[in-house]
Image: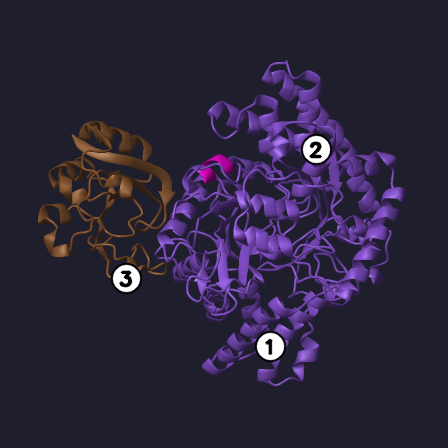
């Protein structure tokens, strides 16, 4: 999901707290085009592209049913990647092996083959970025390397492995430098790895993580997801346990990798080699039309419900009712809007499948989806394997508006909050059965809407909750909850089982956990017990552009410099704080560690 | 009875390996310049609690059984700390002291998993070495797995 908007239409209320210097520094640079996600960059061509995007968005809103456009405009829900409505799908876990151009490689020398394997990845990424709206995932990057070595009879020796390592390092650098879509955004690429126990597979995982871990702070792409499974890499006697420890060490330094946990109840039924996740959290696994797998499957489209707005409406009309009745009303309104979203996602899907196969040239040429583009009789045959997701934002605020309490501070409230999300999941399951399409419940990333929704709601409602400039992500506890990491994963774990379209839990540290890999491992262990599906560790990572000192600081403690490169995680990916959306910038300001440093 | 300043259950990641609860013992005679915890210096400050009550609370709240005893200077109440360690034998415990290793009583040392020794020296402040505040200090592993 990549979104843009030229200006921020609503003035943000003034803060009562004084922003730290880093906020002031970044605020000064926020002018001109205001983007909807942090990966975007200002360029002349980008400006033209964005202007076009906004015209298309308006046109689509004028064109689609009022039932869809009015609530989107009024902030009841948000249609993500609106400019792509009916034009393309969101994101894909690429099946690179199925249509790999082995024939072309036959004429290459061994060295050239290795170099060209990585070039092929770059080629796919660069071109695919132009024919879909969202991220690009590779579900088993380590194993893919091993299979390609085998199939092309590349000898596994030191020389060839060294060339593979150099190619991977060059690939990582390229991911940070390259800009797609007229140069205005970095690629949303995710490499899933950690399970391959082959020599080449292990070497690939080691090379990616070691290079990433030891590279300068500015290297923040691609996103790396370490797949954790007992018997393969999670226990001390497992063959890839050393790689798990290396991953933990890297996380301590650079917040990467994040972790996809296959021993958690919610993932334990899946074959880990068939499943990958997008860095943002989007997960595509269960299917009405075949086996559970992510490989070669897409998320077609998604839209997100503004839960606090529903609660604000109920609070305005029925604030004196007891909590259980308010929750009942909440569910009713939730259903009403979800029903509209269901129709909207189907409308979008139907428009998409009337496109031509030729509109997806890379998909056609390299056969990277589950169904062969060239043999399929229709786009429907291909895209029906994708998911249609309804997401949500601000469970925390919604619950507080309804009850006056935080959902995570008592068992009773926690159960009520789970009941609300469980209700939404049931709705999605009903849509799935009724319409025979892969509907899923998404704990939305909501990078842009975290600020857009409260801005809109403030125009219509007056509630203390709106004093903050952002809504809390999906089912997350407040970013300043004060819960310790183990408590946080216990509270958020049960929501992972419900959010089958994807979700992430973050643990926030005050600064880098300086080689405390036991802390990472311990949180992961507790996460498995608590049912967490996917987790990331965050801490403020600042790097002095003058002397390269790394740490957490306003001015550089070494040289006193004030030109600081600040890395934070947003919507699953690491980005420069300077480019955060207003909502996410405000949220970052309030982030309070779940562990003291 | 042991005199304590506070217990931090927020889960520290810089006071020893893992996610740790930190017990701040009251009273310190080191007076290191730049100390981050000067409110623990006064020997008659803080609160006196029954060791047994403290043990009950820690057992209930510290679900991962990882505790760091810091301060203040815990060894000013060496007998009480020893008694606490005896009662919490199932815990993984780190002790943060300003004393040098040779001045730590042997009977305490043998009950610890980790120890941080040495005074805090402001001029040697480090933000990159794990588990210590200044580069002269040492964080030692006392028990293997």
Question: Would you name the residue on which mark 1 appears?
Answer: A152
Q: Mark 1 vs mark 2: same chain?
A: yes
Residue at 71% from the left image edge and 53% from the top image edge: A35
CA separation, marks 2 and 3?
A: 51 Å
Q: What stretch is highlighted in magenta?
A: A488-492
Chain identifier matching the brown colour in the rendered picture: B
- The label on residue B135 is 3
Magenta stretch, main secondary structure class: helix
Q: Mark 2 sits on what residue?
A: A458
- As drawn, the chain in purple is A
Residue A278 in view here: no
- Chain for mark 2? A
Q: Could you tell me how far apart the alpha carbons at marks 1 and 2 are, in whole angstroms?
A: 60 Å
- Residue A121 vertical placement versus A49 (above, below): below
Alpha carbon of mark 3 to alpha carbon of mark 1: how far? 52 Å
Dot 1 or dot 2: first in sequence order is 1
- Secondary structure of the residue carrying numbered label 2: helix
A347 and A267: which is toward the camera:
A347
> Horizontal and vertical percent for residue A76?
74, 34
């Amino acid at each position: 999901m990549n979104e843009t908007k030229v200006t921020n239409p609503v003035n943000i209320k003034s803060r009562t707290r004084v922003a730290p210097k880093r906020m002031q520094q970044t605020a000064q640079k926020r002018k001109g085009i205001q983007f909807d996600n942090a990966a975007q960059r200002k360029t002349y061509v980008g400006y033209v592209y964005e202007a076009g995007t906004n015209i298309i968005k308006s046109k689509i809103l004028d064109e689609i049913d009022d039932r869809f456009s009015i609530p989107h405009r009024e902030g009841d829900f948000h249609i993500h990647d609106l400019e792509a409505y009916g034009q393309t799908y969101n994101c894909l876990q690429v099946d690179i092996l199925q249509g790999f151009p082995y024939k072309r490689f036959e004429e290459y020398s061994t060295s050239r083959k290795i170099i060209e394997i990585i070039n092929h990845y770059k080629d796919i990424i660069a071109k695919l970025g132009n024919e879909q709206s969202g991220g690009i995932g590779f579900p088993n990057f380590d194993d893919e390397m091993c299979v390609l070595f085998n199939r092309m009879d590349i000898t596994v020796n030191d020389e060839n492995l060294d060339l593979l390592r150099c190619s991977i390092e060059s690939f990582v650098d390229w991911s940070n430098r390259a800009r797609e879509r007229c140069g205005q955004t970095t690629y949303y690429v995710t490499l899933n790895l950690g399970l391959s126990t082959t020599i080449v597979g292990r070497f690939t995982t080691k090379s990616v993580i070691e290079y990433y871990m030891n590279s300068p702070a500015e290297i923040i792409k691609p996103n790396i997801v370490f797949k954790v499974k007992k018997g393969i890499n999670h226990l001390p006697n497992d063959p890839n346990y050393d790689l798990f420890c290396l991953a933990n060490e890297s996380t301590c330094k650079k917040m990467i990798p994040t972790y996809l946990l296959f021993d958690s109840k919610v993932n334990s039924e899946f074959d880990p080699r068939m499943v990958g996740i997008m860095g943002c959290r989007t997960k595509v696994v269960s299917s009405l039309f075949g086996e559970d797998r992510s490989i070669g499957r897409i998320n077609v489209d998604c839209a997100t419900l503004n839960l606090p707005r529903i609660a604000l409406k109920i609070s305005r009309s029925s604030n004196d009712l007891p909590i259980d009745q308010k929750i009942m009303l909440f569910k009713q309104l939730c259903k009403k809007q979800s029903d509209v979203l269901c129709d909207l996602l189907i409308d979008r899907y139907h428009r998409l499948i009337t496109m031509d196969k030729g509109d997806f040239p890379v998909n056609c040429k390299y056969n990277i989806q589950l169904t062969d583009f060239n043999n399929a009789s229709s786009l429907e045959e291909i895209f029906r394997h994708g998911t249609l997701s309804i997401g949500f934002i601000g469970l925390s605020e919604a619950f507080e508006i309804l009850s006056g309490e935080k959902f995570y501070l008592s068992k009773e409230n926690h159960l009520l909050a789970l009941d609300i999300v469980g209700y939404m999941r049931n709705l999605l399951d009903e849509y799935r059965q009724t319409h025979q399409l892969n509907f899923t419940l998404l704990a939305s990333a909501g990078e842009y809407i975290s600020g857009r929704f409260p801005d809109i709601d403030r125009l219509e409602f007056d509630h203390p909750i709106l004093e903050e400039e952002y809504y809390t992500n999906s089912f997350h506890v407040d970013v300043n909850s004060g819960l310790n990491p183990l408590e946080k994963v216990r509270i958020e774990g049960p929501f992972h089982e419900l959010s089958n379209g994807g979700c992430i839990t973050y643990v926030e540290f005050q600064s880098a956990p300086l080689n405390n890999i036991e802390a990472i491992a311990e949180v992961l262990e507790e996460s498995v017990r608590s049912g967490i599906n996917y987790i990331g560790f965050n801490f403020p990572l600042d790097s002095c552009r003058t002397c390269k000192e790394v740490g957490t600081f306003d001015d550089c403690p070494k040289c006193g410099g004030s030109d600081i490169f600040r890395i934070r995680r947003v919507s699953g990916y690491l980005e420069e704080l300077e480019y955060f959306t207003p909502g996410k910038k405000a949220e970052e300001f309030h982030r309070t560690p779940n562990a003291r440093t | 009875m042991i005199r304590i300043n506070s217990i931090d259950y927020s889960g520290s990641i810089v006071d020893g390996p893992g996610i740790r609860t930190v017990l701040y013992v009251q009273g310190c005679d080191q007076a290191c310049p730049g100390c981050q915890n000067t409110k623990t210096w006064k020997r008659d400050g803080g609160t006196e609690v029954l060791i047994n009550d403290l043990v009950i609370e820690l057992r209930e709240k510290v679900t991962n059984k990882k505790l760091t005893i810091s301060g203040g200077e815990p060894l000013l109440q060496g007998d009480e700390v020893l008694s606490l360690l005896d009662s919490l034998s199932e815990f993984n415990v780190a002790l943060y002291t300003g004393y040098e290793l040779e001045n730590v009583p042997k009977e305490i040392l043998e009950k610890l998993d980790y120890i941080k020794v040495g005074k805090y020296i402001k001029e040697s402040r480090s933000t990159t070495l794990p588990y210590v505040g200044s580069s002269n200090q040492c964080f030692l592993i006392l028990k293997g797995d």
